[in-house]
Amino acid sequence: MKKSTILLFFTLTAVGFANAEDVTTSGNGVIYTLESLSTTENSGVTKNGKVYTLTNSITIAEGDRFEIESGATMKMGDGVQLRIEGTANFAATDRVLVTRADENAAPKGIYMVCDASDTEFKNIDFEYAGLRNFSSTGLTVANCTFRYNNGKMTTTGALAIGSDGATFNVDNCTFEYNEVPAIGGSAMAANGIEITNCKFIDNNTKNTNKPQVNLTVGGANSVSIENCEFTGAQRTNVGAVAVANMAGIAGDNIVWISGNTIRDHRYGITFYGGMNATVANNQIIDNKYASSAMAGGAGISIYDYGTKPNVTITGNTIEGNLWGITVLGGENVNIGKVDNPDADDYNPGHNTFKNNGNGGALYDLYNNSALTIYAQGNHWSVDEQTAEKIESVIFHKPDDAKLGEVIYTPAWDGEGSVNEIASEAIRYADGKVYAEGADILVYTLGGALVARANSVADLSALASGVYVARANGKVLKCVK
């Protein structure tokens, strides 16, 4: 303790800190905690029980380390941030609260710029303060909450990711009532991210033109959002999810969005630019709160942005949106292709459309591109799944000769809906895919068929990576 006190005091006096907000540790290999900082002269940290108040911004220099105390409360003054240039451990066993010092304070939060190793945040509750990363190694964030973020650190997101090539894992977190988006990244940085089992509730309360989760493709790394709940507040500018490639980022750019519930936004899911995306087994409902139908309101929308996306859509319920799916570009959009089960691009479809429309008309699928789109094997929002009736809910070449055709027959009668099939209908364990009595097809995320078997498909001979298995009308992601 004495050593850390002397080193910190030496740093302060040696550089002559005229600005008390600019406190930096020595970089001499010291481990700092809130407790040790509270006993260090001129640190700006005071203590009352397990409550620590930071009146100055503090930088943990490269070479030093910061460790959070379990069960502590860290109160931060106006504009204050804790900047980590060294290493850190924010994995708490008992919950830690990071919040403002008082109702008039607008703190920044925690800013990670360390490159030494991944940092884990666990059991941390952020209120009125954010978490920003600009390290090359990324973060793991688990069992954390983010609420009431004020945008003082950045307007990118309550959890702001950055630095090209960094990867992130976010699991079992809740993001709610933040003035800014929940999670956001730089348009110029390729960041792989896996978001699982999270809740997103009314983020971007400022109602700016940003979704709750706003991501850029990952280049060589994948972007994955699985088993999350997105609940909007019927705001006119806020969508649920956007994934973009506005900088022409090269690589596989794999995007996987599966098993989510998405309700009450301006729009559901939007893709911009080159990527290989799969949207599977989601509930995309009542995303219709754009200021007008011309300003959004699609369950899923697909755009070119210099480069073109490949998007596979399967097993979703798309209901009550102003538009079901809108296609304004793309290299290939596959909403169901059932002619040849052995084909690399086979897709059973099994999307269920219901009551998507505006202006008194139903629009389950609006092809506003020159693409020929396969949309076979789906259940449309008409009382009889006949070609004549399905045609009434699809806008394409017969409606405007400049547009591409949608091939939508055969349709699906809706029996054995993928949303009603038990989870055991297809499962992945120990490098094998199981689907008793059924044909199993295994694809790369680029769409190449790499394995086919009945009942059990062994993936042990395949290279490590992410694969898509299909059986019993269900789609499953397999990470080997």
Image (tube, rainbow, N blue to C red):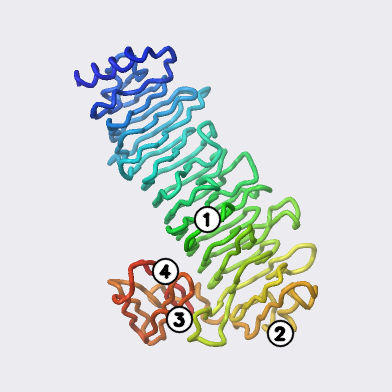
Q: Nearer the viewer, mark 4 or mark 2?
A: 4
> Would you name the residue on which mark 3 appears?
472
Which residue is labeled 4 in the image?
A: 477
Q: Quadrant of residue 203?
A: top right
Q: Are marks 3 and 2 in contact (CB under 8 Å)?
A: no
> Circle 1 sits on which residue?
249
- Give the percent coordinates (x, y) of residue 13: 32, 12
Per the image, label 2 sits on a secondary structure element best described as helix
Sequence order check, earlier mark of 1 and 2: 1
Sooner in the amino-acid sequence: mark 4 or mark 2: 2
Q: Earlier in the sequence, mark 1 or mark 4?
A: 1
Image marks 1 and 2: residues in contact by CB distance under 8 Å: no
Amino acid at dot 3: Asn
Residue at point 28%, 27% (across, down): 27
Distance of mark 1 from mark 3, alpha carbons?
36 Å
What's the distance in space between the residues labelled 4 and 2, CA to CA? 32 Å
From this view, report whether residue 104 is shown above or below residue 317: above
Q: Position of residue 15 (x, y in %)?
A: 36, 15
Mark before the other along the chain sequence, 3 or 2: 2
Disc 1 and disc 4: Cα gap in Å?
A: 24 Å
Q: Is residue 40 left or right of residue 346?
A: left
Q: Residue sitting at 57 percent across and 87 percent down?
A: 339
Q: Position of residue 108 (x, y in %)?
A: 48, 30
The amino acid on which the numbered mark 4 sits, given as a three-letter code, is: Lys
Q: Residue at x 46, y 73 (%)?
A: 475
